[in-house]
Amino acid sequence: MDSLKLYEYAWLIPALPLLSSMIVGIGLISFNQATNKLRKVNSVFIISILGVCLTMAIALFWSQWQGHEPYTKMIEWASAGDFSLSMGYTIDHLSSLMLVIVTTVALLVMIYTDGYMAHDAGYVRFYAYLSIFSASMLGLVISPNLVQVYIFWELVGVCSYLLIGFWYDRKPAADACQKAFVTNRVGDFGLLLGMLGLYWATGTFDFIPMGDRLHELVFSGQVAGWLAALFAILVFLGPVAKSAQFPLHVWLPDAMEGPTPISALIHAATMVAAGVFLIARMYPVFEPIPEVMTVISWTGCFTAFLGATIAVTQNDIKKGLAYSTISQLGYMVMAMGIGAYSAGLFHLMTHAYFKAMLFLCSGSVIHGMEEVVGHEPVLAQDMRLMGNLRKYMPITSTCFLIGTLAICGIPPFAGFWSKDEILGLAFEANPILWLVGWLTAGLTAFYMFRMYFMTFEGSFRGKDHKIQEQLLQTAGITVSGHGHHGEKPHESPLTMTFPLMALAVPSVLIGLLGMPWNNRFEEFIASPNEEVLEVAHHFDLNEFLIMGGNSVGIALIGITIASLCYLQGKIDYRAIAEKIQPLYELSLNKWYFDDIYDRVFVQGCRRIARGIMEVDYKVVDGAVNLTGLATIISAEGLKYFENGRVQFYALIVFAAVLGFAIAFTVIS
């Protein structure tokens, strides 16, 4: 297939997974039992389709890497008078990179799903959901304008709702998918308002013309600067919700109630990265407005710190990784806010691979633990019941260690190059941002190695009945018949370990694309703003050694403290927790955000609803009932006048005429 043909058929990349999910979905609706029996046929079909998409995505990426011009194809979708709206797709450096990230992670997650969901009754339905999610995300990244982004943005949100609540018969999963949906609606409403406001000001939904026109209008005084900033911040609310930034971060940890493959695909690698991707696409609008960039950078900075401080005390392996994801997304958003466009996207790419691997490793651990403690998530996911799993699960433990070293920023692993670049640029932009990011890097190293040591080192605690009973009682679950206590954890099947090993490769090597003395990634992914492009391409060895040394140094301090606490037992972390009880409680209770939101929004809305119901009951219903009562009384009275006698009717007519005559006489 020649280069141009490849670009002409690029629309098939999102269309094929959509088609495969539609075929399987129709099968489930029309021939449920037969479709569910053909488990392997359905999974192989969906995986093969995504394999084709991956091949096309790599070909497009390679073509862009070799210097092919960006390609955009548009068709008129709707028009009325002066208004015209076009839809289509665009393949440029950013979209080709995102296509490769989404298709590689999605394909490996689908292969992994075969092992993880092997005994689940909803196996085929899960694959159909995975496929429609992949289609939505792929459609999002090739969208050429804000309207099309919004359409796929909402589709991605629906898929997230379906997948978090996949086990809808479990109350925590049902609650979590509602929480995710409602929280994202808040951000999406802001995005919609901002989008419409920008269209009102600029008359276009296309990213670069929108930014250029807005800048001209503000410069000429036709649009107030504060109004342009307001529209931009409203648009930023969309990424705040989708990328789980403060204050709309509360949904992501609860989303761990979904099956682990979803935690890896949606909540680590792709969907949450959509927020950072949209900030990148909206850069022509955001970048010329300093106030907006400041809001973005500080939101990201605070979120990075917030996520890390909460992750320090989490005992659920998936929730610990979820707060870690919030923290790392904070780094990306902070990078975008300080103008470090390519650094933020570089961290998006490296994080997608190593965090997807860490989540899949946690799924492998849970899969192994279920053999010992049963399928109750409270037990299977709690690190206090793990320990020494390296002995039983060597592949999983090695991959988890690689991912941990990558996220801690230890060279030469991928996370070092991307995180160090962000911290270096943060120092130039604002030393306070750098300081918070630097301290967060130390916390990251501490909590990640805390997770590694609690899970894979020490002695195995899975058969400790006291801890099991305590955990079940805390969760309010009746203690009876949990676990198969004769069993030992074991390594997961090849369908689960192969994706781990495959993701380990980019987790180690992909960072080498962004080595500061030969930053090929930055040359490829350049900001749409020309001026930013010219500032790059200088490398100071001393600066690199100082900044890199600082970030590695704080990471090594974090690792050492985690080792002394959780591996060697030389520091009694319980005693420290008692001494700083308020801070420990603050972290353990997630800074009380859930409690505050419950009190203010959930209970507050219920009180308002009850008040409205009272008004409805007493005023509206009262008015309706009064009308009915008046009608009944008047009808009851009038029925005595309806007796069928002509003389009586004549008497009434005479009385009425006489009454009118008297009234007329009095008035005149």
Image (spheres, grey):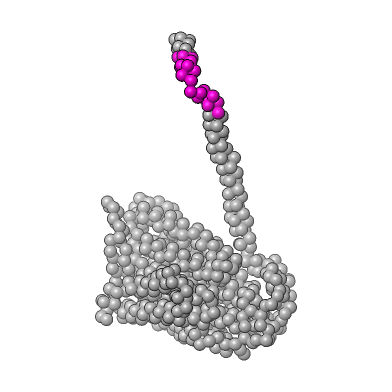
Asked which quadrant contains residue 19, the reply is: bottom left
Q: Quadrant of the C terminus?
A: top left
Picture residue at 54% right of the left edge, 24% below the top: 640
| Residue positioned 40% across, 62% down in the render | 150
Residue at image location 55% in from the left, 67% down from the top? 168
Q: Nearer the viewer, residue 289 or 588?
A: 588
Q: Which residues are magenta?
A: 636-657
Residue at the image position 47 percent from the left and 85 percent from the top: 502
Image location of residue 199, percent across then percent down: 36, 55
Q: Quadrant of the N terminus?
A: bottom left
Q: How many marks?
A: 0
Please provide percent x and percent y for residue 313.
64, 73
Front residue of this view, candidates 167 and 95: 167
Label the magenta part by its dominant secondary structure: helix
Residue 652, magenta (yes or no): yes
Residue 3: in magenta span: no
